[in-house]
Amino acid sequence: MKVFDIAIIGGGMVGLALAASLRNSPVKIAVIEGFPEKEPIEQLSNRVSAINLASEKMLQELGIWQSLLDLRATAYNKMDVWEKDSFAQIQFDTQSLGLSHLGHIIENHLIQHQLWQKVQAQKNVEIITALPQHLGLTESNGILSTKDGQMLSAKLIVGADGANSWLRKQADIPLIFRDYGHHALVCNVKTTEPHENCARQIFAKDSILAFLPLHQQNLCSIVWSLSPQQATALLNAEQDEFNKVLSVAFDNRLGLCKVQGERKTVPLTARYARSFAKNRIALVGDAAHTIHPLAGLGVNLGFQDAIALAQEINKNLELGVDIGEYRYLRHYERWRKTEAVKMLVAMQGLKDLFNGDNPLKKLVRGIGLSTTNHLGFVKEQLIKQALGI
């Protein structure tokens, strides 16, 4: 049996960020990932994240930020949000904050690739390419077996294995969830007009459409939240028909849109684990919570989980206490549950606010957004929250 201090189940962005954040710690780490990176970095992906300034700082400290900039990380310095067929509109830019940019749009697989390179080079990490099979918990450790017959023990087992977390299920941690009633259609599109490094989002009565700028001025990644029926219809539509519907849905802000590559749809569900930690167990990222992608903040919340858990582990190591005991994980749990609830409530509130086309509701939205757009201090606080500063 192999013996570790920490076993991280899941080699996605958040699990790898946690391992990398512990690079200078005297702990022995196993990263268990059944399906290591697949997409070649040369290939443009349609799954992207809006990396805020807090996450950028973390990636800088991990030593991979410059390599992401050298690939296809795209800075955006403006945000434009509006409602279809309404005067409701709000805009953000860097001038009032004294910043060079608001964030970066980066393909998920590029972040994952660079983190893999970093973690593979760590002396305190062993990567186990296998799927977990059984979990056993004792007072002093957790015991894992994998489908290829390996056995290992660890003082702390971390679930970074996504929304359908195997570890969360094995540990019998209940899940609160709510179907958003939307599917996200994602793809890349070429536009007639340049995006000018502006992230744009339009709310309609039954959909939310975001255009996120990519490395070429006429290339954007879109996230289109629609009813399951609409999403399926557009997924299967002929390209010309899809391009026409998309351009109209986006108010032709960037001219005619032409889809590039494949389209994908993903069901959208809000999830919140009842416990983010218990004896020998901690959850991070989508294993603990998932939120609506309308603000593109999901991975940033997960990265903050990784930073927080690494801080707690390092603090407990300095104190000489057992890093896997629940009483020493409670601070992490309280901290991250509070932040996750704030974000879940905010995303649900925003979605509910723009849901439907009742004339009175539209008037309230228009007045509210337009007023906020002219209140510098309120706008500044909103954008600072989104940027993680």
Image: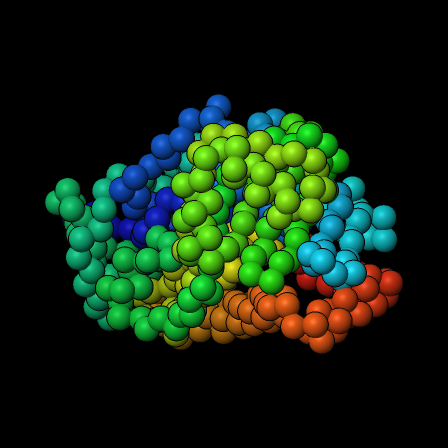
Q: Observer-nearest residue: 309 or 35?
A: 35
Q: Position of residue 221 (x, y in %)?
A: 57, 39
The reply to whether residue 374 is visible in this rendering is: yes
- 269 above or below 132? below
Which coloring applies here?
A: rainbow
Q: Residue 176 vs residue 45: left or right?
A: left
Q: Position of residue 214 (x, y in %)?
A: 62, 34
Q: Observer-nearest residue: 198 or 58?
A: 198
Q: Residue at x 32, y 51 (%)?
A: 9
Q: Position of residue 279 (x, y in %)?
A: 32, 70
Q: Residue 228 vs residue 138: left or right?
A: right
Extreme-top residue of the structure? 42
Q: Residue 76 vs residue 121: left or right?
A: right
Q: Position of residue 149 (x, y in %)?
A: 12, 45
Q: Observer-nearest residue: 236 or 53?
A: 236
- 61 above or below 72? below
Labels in figure, total:
0
Q: Residue at x 24, y 64 (%)?
A: 170
The reply to whether residue 25 is visible in this rendering is: no
Q: Residue at x 27, y 64 (%)?
A: 169
Quadrant assignment for the C terminus: bottom right
Q: Residue at x 47, y 30 (%)?
A: 261
Quadrant in which residue 199 is drawn: top right
